[in-house]
Image: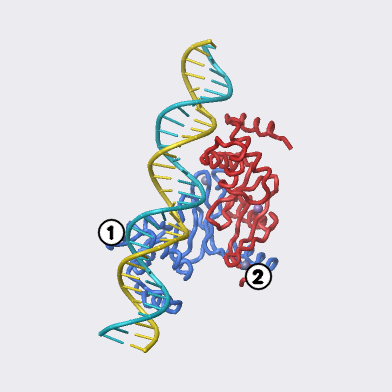
Chain colours: A blue, B red, C cyan, D yellow
Amino acid sequence: MNHSGDISSKLRRRGYRLTPQRMMILEAVEAADGHISADEIYARVCDRYPHLNISTVYRTFELLKELGLVTETDMGDGRVRYHSIRKGHHHHLVCQNCGCIIDLDEAVLLPLKDALFRDYGFDADLKHLAIFGRCSKCR
Amino acid sequence: MNHSGDISSKLRRRGYRLTPQRMMILEAVEAADGHISADEIYARVCDRYPHLNISTVYRTFELLKELGLVTETDMGDGRVRYHSIRKGHHHHLVCQNCGCIIDLDEAVLLPLKDALFRDYGFDADLKHLAIFGRCSKCR
DNA sequence: GGTTTTATTGAAACTAATTGCAGTTACAAT
DNA sequence: ATTGTAACTGCAATTAGTTTCAATAAAACC
Ligand SMILES: [Mn+2]
Ligand SMILES: [Mn+2]
Ligand SMILES: [Zn+2]
Ligand SMILES: [Zn+2]
């Protein structure tokens, strides 16, 4: 799957460039399944392309987020994790006791999103949320 | 208001101690209004009690959180902020464009909390949430 | 082509927060 | 009073992430 032409023009239109670094990082993000951290992406890309700086990874994630190509979520361990947007909008329930993660369909948060828009005119950005608490086993 | 006896026994029951450091920190948290950071508490306490380490502040906040005496929230600036629980449960809408903060009553999130409990048996910890997005002016 | 402009990068400095550890303190049991 | 145990603290080192800045590479202009 090579939609790098897609992305290149998407970047170009905003005055950005599709550099080798960005290409490699994006490729690695698309290849990864699950929630991946900057460090992990850095390690994987470095295997094939050693001249990469960790700052560039962080900056690229910032950019990809801005472009809506990835979503960012803090799942409660000490680092932020990313998801390719191609995996669709969804959310997670994270148990603070046993650490288990329950997947949640986007629809569960729609009533809230609608209420915030209706009552406060606020357009909530609920793309990939982590909601903390206790699962049924741990209550 | 001096309910330090309260807290002392609350700690004691769990095998913790009410040390001078903890007393000063808790006092400063109660005195502060609004959302306060570890750094800010550290500075305030140090004015009167210079022999305090910033690690102790972080660790004390961890403990106070565990005891349910403060709530912790990341409002989107680079640091975590705290609230005395005495200010009641509430939430905030944080505009990612202009930075404005809209206060939100606890009730707005009750339907979600109930739905998560009903459908997933998940007891969501929604004590002091920050929901990011765009306010009515910035859409 | 050559020149100017602008985005991008890596390296290093920096911030917020956490962790490991060794020394200290409180407290309960002898 | 002495001892043993567990909690607590300060300090230093570490981690995740951001910022600053000079060097570079790409695009745009001539
Ligand atoms: Mn996910
Ligand atoms: Mn608040
Ligand atoms: Zn659990
Ligand atoms: Zn706004």
Position of D6 with respect to A122 (left or right) is left
Residue topped by disc 2? B136
Residue at mark 2: chain: B
Residue topped by disc 1? A47
Quadrant the N terminus of chain A occupies? bottom left
Is ligand 4 within 8 Å of the beta carbon of the residue shown at mark 2?
yes
The label on residue B60 is: none
Quadrant the C terminus of chain A occupies? top right
Q: CA distance from mark 2 to mark 1?
A: 46 Å
In percent of the image, x 61 and y 49: which residue is there? Answer: B36
Kind of element beneath mark 1? helix
- Is residue B104 shown to the viewer in this render? yes
Disc 2 residue type? Ser
Q: Is residue B32 above or below residue A24?
A: above
Is ligand 1 within 8 Å of the beta carbon of the residue shown at mark 1?
no
In percent of the image, x 52 and y 51: which residue is there? Answer: A94
- So how many labels did they put on this image? 2
In percent of the image, x 68 and y 43: which residue is there? Answer: B31
